Image: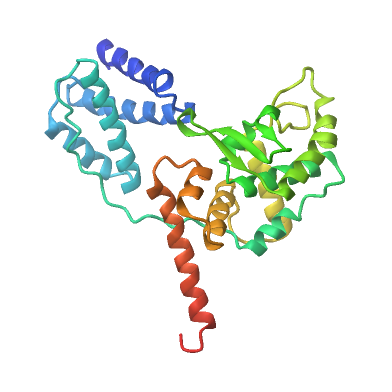
Amino acid sequence: MDNETAAILDQFLAHLKVERGLADNTITSYSRDLMRFSAFLDRKKRTPMNLDREVLSGYVRHLGKSLSARSVARHISSLRRFFRFLVREGKLETNPARLLDSPKMPRKLPGTLSPQEVELLLSAPKPDTPKGQRDLAMLELLYATGLRVSELVGLKISNINLESGYVRTIGKGSKERIVPIGEKARTALAAYLEEGRTAFSRRADSLSAFLFLNFRGKPLTRQGFWKILKGYAVQTGIRKNITPHRLRHSFASHLLEAGADLRSVQMMLGHADISTTQIYTHVTRKRLIQLHESCHPRP
């Protein structure tokens, strides 16, 4: 990679972080995609400022030989955004990636837990220990709000308002949203804050503003929560692959099944595009069809 290309890539990644406010994980994905693209251009003795659509089409065909359609689509999205940036910065007159076609993919329906399985999972933590109080508070809060796991472990005490019953979180693109929390989650959080969290915080060298702490009194990580969740999945004997995102899917699907409107669920999930939320309507339709077939006298 020549110095000019390296410099423009650094500028683009800085733009994503500072001006667009994207998460570090998202920026890392862009970086990986563009490093792979740069390696391809090096072999073709081209640069991002010296190519045409045929070179780009060749790159897409190259990706298709080893990547899934979903991964190819992500790479194309990265290229479109990168070249829009180059046009904006005056490095190019037109965006050579604007006409690239993304591969069509069937949308995979999200996996969910049944309400009975959720109840079983939430009954697993024992609220007579600091660990049990913390774990119950996390699981109740996750199911009550549909937070992403990164949002859950990133919560600070100041983000929770138990009196009014809501949580304030910063989601993708640094967008803030307010999500209500129900009575059971509020009760579990109150018990954790009064007892469990106090016990954990005593073990820390310094006080932490984060809501959920590990045994050393430090902020719990995504990996730490994942391990906790997997432990309860094994304990309850639920055979489905239980992940934090599966609880998020369950939150959305159960709300829609109970009659919640799509726009409200979109706001609670923090989806920028309502079409992302609409995939959950397919889950509820599928369940209705299964219910009809199993219960109707003339299926």
Q: Left or right: where does residue 12 sit relative to residue 232?
A: left
Q: Answer whether residue 144 is visible to the viewer in this image.
A: yes
Name the spot of residue 36 as percent of width and height, x first: 31, 29
Extreme front residue here? 164
The structure residue drawn at horizontal position 73% and vertical position 44%, both measured from the top left corner, is 186
Name the spot of residue 116 as percent of width and height, x first: 67, 64
Name the spot of residue 164 as percent of width and height, x first: 69, 39
Q: Left or right: where does residue 127 sit relative to residue 262?
A: right
Extreme right residue here? 128
Q: Nearer the viewer, residue 217 or 94?
A: 94
- Does residue 241 lie above or below 54 as drawn? below
Quadrant housing residue 71: top left
Give the colour scheme of this rendering.
rainbow
Looking at the figure, which quarter contains the N terminus? top left
Name the spot of residue 181 as percent of width and height, x first: 66, 45
Q: Nearer the viewer, residue 141 or 42?
A: 141
Q: Answer whether residue 68 is visible to the viewer in this image.
A: no
Total numbered labels placed on residues in the image: 0
Quadrant housing residue 53: top left
Q: Left or right: where does residue 249 sit relative to residue 180?
A: left
The structure residue drawn at horizontal position 65% and vertical position 39%, both measured from the top left corner, is 166
- Does residue 190 lie above or below 14 as drawn? below
- Does residue 180 lie above or below 98 as drawn? below
Q: Nearer the viewer, residue 233 or 18?
A: 18
- Does residue 154 lie above or below 62 as drawn? above
The structure residue drawn at horizontal position 34% and vertical position 31%, both measured from the top left corner, is 33
